[in-house]
Amino acid sequence: MDDLKHLKLQVYSADWCPDCRRLEQWLNSQGVTYEKIDIEQVEGAAQKLEAETGKRAIPFLLVNGHTWIRGYHKELPQRFSPDVLIQELKNIP
């Protein structure tokens, strides 16, 4: 995942969330560096996510401190596609 190394990723998630675990396992397996922001442990994290995205769903990734993208794909049977995520990350300026 060399093409993603220039990105600063913060993953907004929670330990009880299966979609979050799926995303984090994939990121770990690919050697992608990220900071986990547990919305139940970090004060104000859930409020920031909702205020800036208009969503309460997790996981979401905050990329380079300014662009939010989904870390789940509810429209897909497996709920996560590395290809979709990589394409969205590559489209960030």
Image (cartoon, rainbow, N blue to C red):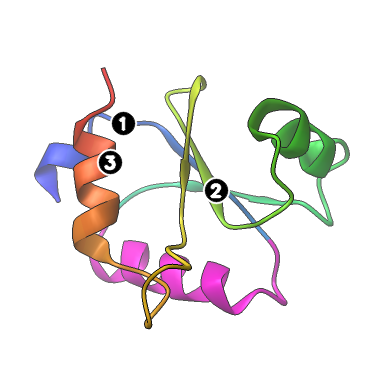
Mark 2 vs 1, N-terminal side: 1
Q: Are marks 1 and 3 in contact (CB under 8 Å)?
A: no
Crowding at mark 2 (Cα within 10 Å: few <14, some 14-19, many 20+): many
Task: Indicate which label's residue lies in the foreground, 2 or 1.
Answer: 2
Label 1's element? loop
Magenta span: predominant SS is helix
Residue 78 position (above or below residue 25): below
Across and down, in percent, residue 66 comes to 50, 19
Label 3's element? helix
Q: Amino acid at mark 1?
A: Leu
Q: CA distance from mark 1 to mark 3?
A: 12 Å
Among all residues in the image, which is located at the extreme front? 75
Across and down, in percent, residue 75 comes to 42, 68
Q: Which disc, if any, is residue 88?
A: 3
The residue under the point 34% across, 62% down is 27
Task: Indicate which label's residue lies in the foreground, 1 or 3.
Answer: 3
Residue 50 position (above or below residue 58): above
Q: CA distance from mark 3 to mark 2?
A: 12 Å
Across and down, in percent, residue 73 comes to 42, 63
Residue range highlighted in magenta: 14-31
In this rendered view, identify the residue nearer to me: 39 or 34.
39
The residue under the point 67% across, 56% down is 57
In this rendered view, identify the residue nearer to me: 20 or 81.
81
Residue 76 position (above or below residue 53): below
Q: Amino acid at mark 3?
A: Glu
Q: Which disc, if any, is residue 60?
A: 2
Q: Quadrant of residue 79?
A: bottom left
Q: Are marks 3 and 2 in contact (CB under 8 Å)?
A: no
Crowding at mark 1 (Cα within 10 Å: few <14, some 14-19, many 20+): some
Q: Amino acid at mark 2?
A: Phe
Residue bearing the label numbered 1: 7
Mark 1 vs 3, N-terminal side: 1
